Image: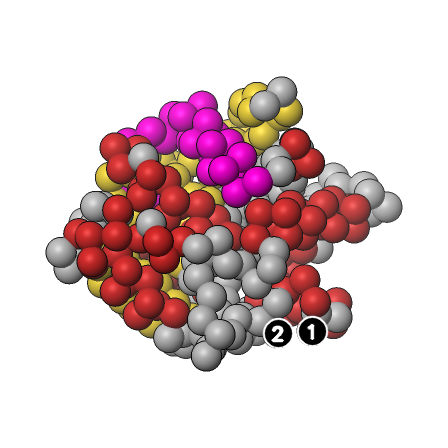
Amino acid sequence: MSQPATTTVEINGFPCRVWTKGQGPKLGFLAGLGGLPRWLPFLDKLAETRTVVAPSLPGYPGATGHTELDSHLDWVLTVRQLLDKAGLAGADLVGASVGGAFAAEMAAIFPAHVARLILIAPFGLFDDKEPAADPWAQRRDALPGLMCADGANWTALVAPPDGANSVEWPIEMSRASEAAARAFWPLGNTRLEKRLGLIAAPTLVLWGEHDTLLPPSYAQKFARGIDHGNGGATRIETIPGAGHLAYLDQPDAVARAVLAHLG
């Protein structure tokens, strides 16, 4: 697997890494919990027919500056800047988990910025009748099974990449968890349901059938909220054998679903 091209953009005075690989129309990817410590097979599948652009959110591997973001509005405006500087304004956009919540916000608040939208088990909603799990309240040994149907896939994601300092790497992962918590604690609820009806982009909602972090029933909640505004242009697809980060468990199946939606 060849490595992507690496560039850096400055957001709020801090560097954020942008990875780019592939050919064809641009496709943005905002990663889920854990970020992108390494390039993934899922992204390689997309890069066969699309130019995949994956900017790192502040605080995640490859980026800093999350401690400057004190409110949800700070985060939304920062992600808007990140997409602009990564050359993704007006492109198709995939967002997963925490990145999915931001992708939905972009499509709702800045509709001209997102052509077509794919959400993979996004954060942003909370139903006290079907509560989401709290990823920040878990023991370390419980996280792999919460993130993936096959916990080994999460373990492989967060293992130190080639060239990483083994002493500093746990600090990097703790920083990524802190960044997500600053944006989404408690329980990933950002009242996104109030803005879903503003989304006009044709939307695909993907959910792993074994997601134990966010109940798969949340897919229907997202679709209903979006379709209130865009008149039924939302589809839901369940990914068998996948957990919360479905693109780690079933990269080929998730890539096929994404590319089918994009036509």
- Taking the image as shown, residue 224 lies to the left or right of residue 103, namely left
Which residue, given by chain and number where applicable, does mark 1 sit on?
142
What percent of the width, then of the height, locates residue 234?
21, 59
- Taking the image as shown, residue 103 lies to the left or right of residue 220, namely right
Which residue, given by chain and number where applicable, does mark 2 sit on?
145
- Image disc number at residue 44: none
Q: Residue at x 74, y 50 (%)?
A: 174
Residue 214 falls within the magenta-colored stretch: no
> What secondary structure is found at the residue carrying circle 1?
helix
Residue 73 falls within the magenta-colored stretch: yes
- Taking the image as shown, residue 40 lies to the left or right of residue 110, namely right
Q: Are marks 2 and 1 in contact (CB under 8 Å)?
A: yes
Residue type beneath disc 2? Gly
Label 2 – label 1 distance at C-alpha: 6 Å
Residue 154 against residue 99 in the figure, above or below: below
Asked whether residue 43 is in view, the answer is: no
Magenta residues, start to end: 71-93
